[in-house]
Image: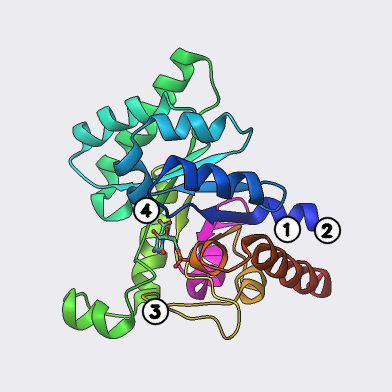
Amino acid sequence: MNIDEAREKLIVALDVESTEQALDLVEQLKPWAGMFKVGMQLFYSQGPAVIKDICRQGVKVFLDLKLHDIPNTVAQAVRVLTRLGVTMFNVHAAGGRAMMRAALESCGEESTALGIPRPLVVAVTVLTSIDQLAFNRELGLSGPVLDRVVAWALLAKECGLDGVVASAQEAAAIRQSCGPDFLIITPGIRPAGAAGGDQKRIVTPAGALAAGASRLVVGRPIIGAPEPVKAARAILSEMVVVVASSM
Ligand SMILES: O=C(O)c1cc(=O)[nH]c(=O)n1[C@@H]1O[C@H](COP(=O)(O)O)[C@@H](O)[C@H]1O
């Protein structure tokens, strides 16, 4: 794998409040990232216009709103979001089979009507900020986190979704259960020694790739660094070395 292939796998989370900040990061980082993630903070503050502004920079957008509601509500929201021209968006696996199917069907119909490619649809599984203890004691869910993540990944696959969002700690098991073409998007990425913050199920960039992650989502280790470009390039270097040595 060369640097371009590693770059394609890096998704930078634009967790900022203003369009100006987001566009500044896109401008700096577009040679070093394959996609940019717009999450709740930026979307709720700037609205759909920010997606168009970012797409105008010629980059791909992952819209991360973690849709989770009754099937009809999600389907109608997806219909509107599909018009924004994003490359990928997420729904929550906990919404269940009917909700995931409705989301996929709705974005398929809308993109066909518009004559645009269908956005990739991925399901969020267990948030990377939840550790085993919280999973069992706070959420009251039994068994290992890993089992729930793999079960939701299989459900998402059965519904026809393109992949899941999970910690890279579960990537190898998901890859084994869901096959080579299923997208595994992994946040909770931290270079060795970086502050974990609220993330609990953490993996290094190298570890995530070695486990079979398709794409790595990185926010604060890049956008919070004194020199975001330098931080992104350091992560890419780590990705290239590991994959090259495992080939
Ligand atoms: O769906 C997501 O992108 C997501 C799912 C998850 O389980 N954990 C998670 O951290 N994320 C997002 O990934 C990004 C991680 O950011 P950092 O922790 O700053 O690298 C944030 O924008 C989160 O909203």
Q: Of callouts 1 and 3, which one flags the residue occurring earlier in the amino acid sequence?
A: 1
Q: Is residue 81 left or right of residue 138?
A: right
The label shown at residue 155 is 4
Tell me the quarter of the image containing the N terminus.
bottom right
Disc 2: which residue: 2
> Badge 1 is on which residue?
6
Tell me the magenta residue range: 167-186
Q: Is mark 2 within 8 Å of ligand 1?
A: no
Q: CA distance from mark 2 to mark 3?
A: 30 Å
Three-letter amino acid code at the position of disc 3: Lys
Horizontal and vertical percent position of residue 140 = 16, 76
Label 2 sits on what residue type? Asn
Compare marks 4 and 3 and give the one earlier in the sequence.
4
Residue 229 horizontal/vertical position (percent):
67, 60
| C-alpha gap between disc 4 and disc 2 | 34 Å
Q: Quadrant of ligand 1?
A: bottom left
Secondary structure under badge 2? loop
Label 4 crowd bin: few (<14), some (14–19), many (20+), radius 10 Å: some
What secondary structure is marked by label 4? helix
Which mark, by number, is residue 200? 3
Lower sequence index among marks 2 and 3 = 2
**In the picture shown, does residue 176 fall above or below 143?**
above
